[in-house]
Amino acid sequence: MLLTRVFLLLGFVSVIPVASKKRIIRPRSKTLQLALDSSVNSNLSRSSASNIANLSLSPWTYIYSFNSSRLPQKILQANCSTSGCLNLQGRGEDATLQVKPIKYQVLVLYRTLKKRKNSKKGKKQNEYIFTLGTEEITVGCTCVRPTVIPQE
């Protein structure tokens, strides 16, 4: 998918300063041109992912999280369908197990509007600043033993 290549690029860029032993001096601001390749497709199709979700003892559905100031604007997230795990026969929930979401942290770009004044024409122009950030998303659900806290 298009976003996979962007995330891989952003992940690689974030690792470079850690790998270098020299001191890095960064400029206050830097303009980068970001080219997105629309020919890149994901290896995991949505239909095969939903088959896994339906076969699980802790099934989930997918919903879109939308944020217009984020790149990517739409992120597919898992939403756990039950609070207890299904029994092996598929007839009801097993009360001895709990469903917990599986979380994953992804890199995103946040877009903020910065108004600046054009000195040549005297008109204000809009300029966007992109900041690298992370978001925690739910990628699936799993069955776990309940956490028991002993009372003293």
Image (cartoon, rainbow, N blue to C red):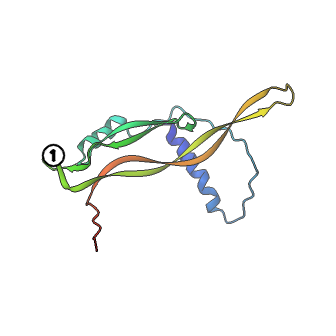
In which image quadrant can residue 110 be found?
A: top right
Q: Which residue is mark 1?
A: 92
Q: Residue at x 44, y 51 (%)?
A: 104
- Seen as rendered, the residue at the extreme front is 152
- Seen as rendered, the residue at the extreme right is 120
Q: Residue at x 62, y 62 (%)?
A: 19
Q: Residue at x 72, y 60 (%)?
A: 24
Give neighbour class at mark 1: few <14, some 14-19, many 20+ (Cα, 10 Å).
few
Q: Position of residue 29 (x, y in %)?
A: 74, 46
Compared with residue 104, is residue 62 higher up or lower down, i.e. above or below?
Answer: above
Q: Residue at x 50, y 42 (%)?
A: 4
Work out whether residue 126 or residue 15 is closer to the camera in this orientation and state it: 126
Task: Please state which amino acid type lies under the numbered disc 1.
Answer: Gly
Quadrant, the C terminus: bottom left
Compared with residue 145, is residue 9 higher up or lower down, i.e. above or below?
Answer: above
In which image quadrant can residue 52 be found?
A: top left
- Seen as rendered, the residue at the extreme bottom is 152
Q: Position of residue 3 (x, y in %)?
A: 51, 39
Q: Position of residue 43 (x, y in %)?
A: 41, 40
Work out whether residue 75 or residue 17 is closer to the camera in this orientation and state it: 75
> How many marks can you see?
1
Compared with residue 100, is residue 36 higher up or lower down, i.e. above or below?
Answer: above
Mark 1 secondary-structure assignment: loop
In which image quadrant can residue 77 be found?
A: top left
Q: In the image, is 51 to the left or to the right of 114?
A: left
Q: Position of residue 89 (x, y in %)?
A: 12, 47
